[in-house]
Amino acid sequence: MFDKILIANRGEIAVRIIRACREMGIKTVAVFSEPDREALHTQLADEAVCIGSAKVSDSYLDMNNIISAAVEKQAQAIHPGFGFLSENSMFAGVCKDCNIKFIGPKGSVIDALGNKANARQMMINAGVPVIPGSDGILADVEQAYEMADKLGYPVIVKASAGGGGKGIRIVRKKEELKEAFLSAQSETKAAFGDDSMYMEKLIEGARHVEVQILGDSFGNVIHLGERDCSLQRKNQKVLEETPCEVLSESTRAKICDSAVRAAKAAGYENAGTIEFLYDEDSDKYYFMEMNTRVQVEHPITEMVTGVDIVKEQIRIAAGEKLLYTQDDIKISGHAIECRINAENPLLDFRPSPGRIKSLFIPGGPGIRVDTAVYQGYEIPPYYDSMLAKVIVHGRDRDEAIAKMKRALYEFIIEGVDTNIEYQNKILNNKQFEKCQYNTSFLENVKL
């Protein structure tokens, strides 16, 4: 097992990893940008190193500075969390070259699965259903026009690299394609340093269902069930739950089996998530992409399975076998996660950085809050606006909803605007209560 791990991230995921390491008796090194000098993760870690300025390219995306910090502090491994360098195969390769363990899959597997276009071809080869679309990367706008005419509008142009909703544009008519393609390309280039794009037919009214998998270096791969992540705004997830209530047991088994087969075909190691679109009307599912990292919403899976995904990531990276077989995994009850952001829903979700003047975090049976904020904390304007994740677990979906309503009622954040009331409106919506929603729900329903 590792003696010391560097966490190449910030915010609540850095805190989450530090806590797991402390429970495992592993020392931690936090890295931070200048604005994050007083951030919680820098205070909880055993050691902390400044790696640059506010600009992510000069800090959290600066491989040289991060590797230098790891070497200086003699960290044996680096956990990238999610976002930033977590799905960067070059970074995984640099870690390997420096004899530092990258807590994630091999760089070659990241290229094969983290690159959305490559992953699509791999799924075709593995016999996993895929959405009709382009075979590989689109060379330019002209090729995008040709593919869109072949597929028929509406289509969706997507970045091959990255995640978090970046580099994705829906195109409903030919006149919109050029601007959508170029703006998505520019966005993903700025965020991930890769502007390669591909295209798929837009399947409207579907659900976003993803399967959590774990694989070790001995060829063992298991799934931890599925999550329903259909409640999204502009391709950003807002609320997630597990299990997906609308799946039949036979369809659930098929989706989870497809995820395991795909991971085995790739020789996948560590934690990963395979995302599908599910069409309720036809009872068909289609592979979308694979995230070769831990997901923001991993806590709801932990709540219903009892598996600590971050600890398993660390054990796998240290060369240990999975603690669990597929028969050990039992789904118990229902879990929901609400993402609490510093933003104003009444002003088109405008980010709301600033100082937290007052804070009360909810608690009680079945309530978990993952956060990196504290009273007096100054939220910087340079990074993601997520303040916290409220996670609840109940015996069934109705109890989970009731617990979340109670938790959000107790949650007090003063000094900045938040989306807590917006989340409450979702929970009290009749269609949500009946589980009648899909990926376009938040765009089409007035809350």
Image (cartoon, grey):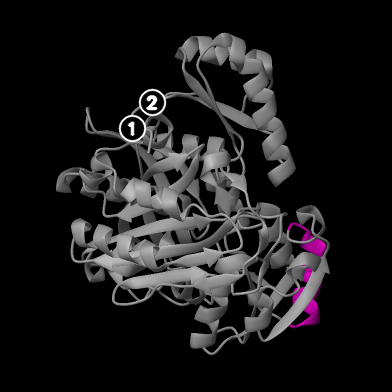
Kindly report the distance in space between the C-alpha atoms of the residues bearing marks 1 and 2.
Answer: 6 Å
If the image is split into quadrants, where does the N terminus sit? bottom right
Residue that carries the numbered disc 1 in the rendered image: 206
Q: Amino acid at mark 2?
A: Ile
**Label 1 amino acid?**
Ala
Q: Quadrant of the C terminus?
A: top left
Nearest to the observer: residue 239 or residue 147? 239
Q: Which residues are magenta?
A: 61-74
Image position of 204 with respect to 32: above or below: above
Callout 1 secondary element: loop
In terms of image quadrants, where is residue 146?
top right
Tell me: 427 left or right of 369. Answer: left
Mark identifier at residue 399 = none
Residue at the spot of label 2: 203
Q: For the stretch drawn in magenta, what is the main secondary structure?
A: helix
Q: Nearer the viewer, residue 101 or 333?
A: 333
- Residue 371 in the image: x percent, y percent? 53, 69
Residue 299 falls in which quadrant of the image? bottom left
User: Going by the picture, which residue comes out furthest to the bottom?
Assistant: 25
Whether residue 17 is visible to the viewer of this picture, yes or no, is yes
Q: Is the residue 52 above or below the residue 196 in the image?
A: below
- Residue at the image point whose x is 24% and y is 33% from the top: 280
Asked if the stretch drawn in magenta spans residue 72, the answer is yes
Give x and y (percent) for residue 12.
Answer: 56, 67
Q: Is residue 37 above or below residue 182?
A: below
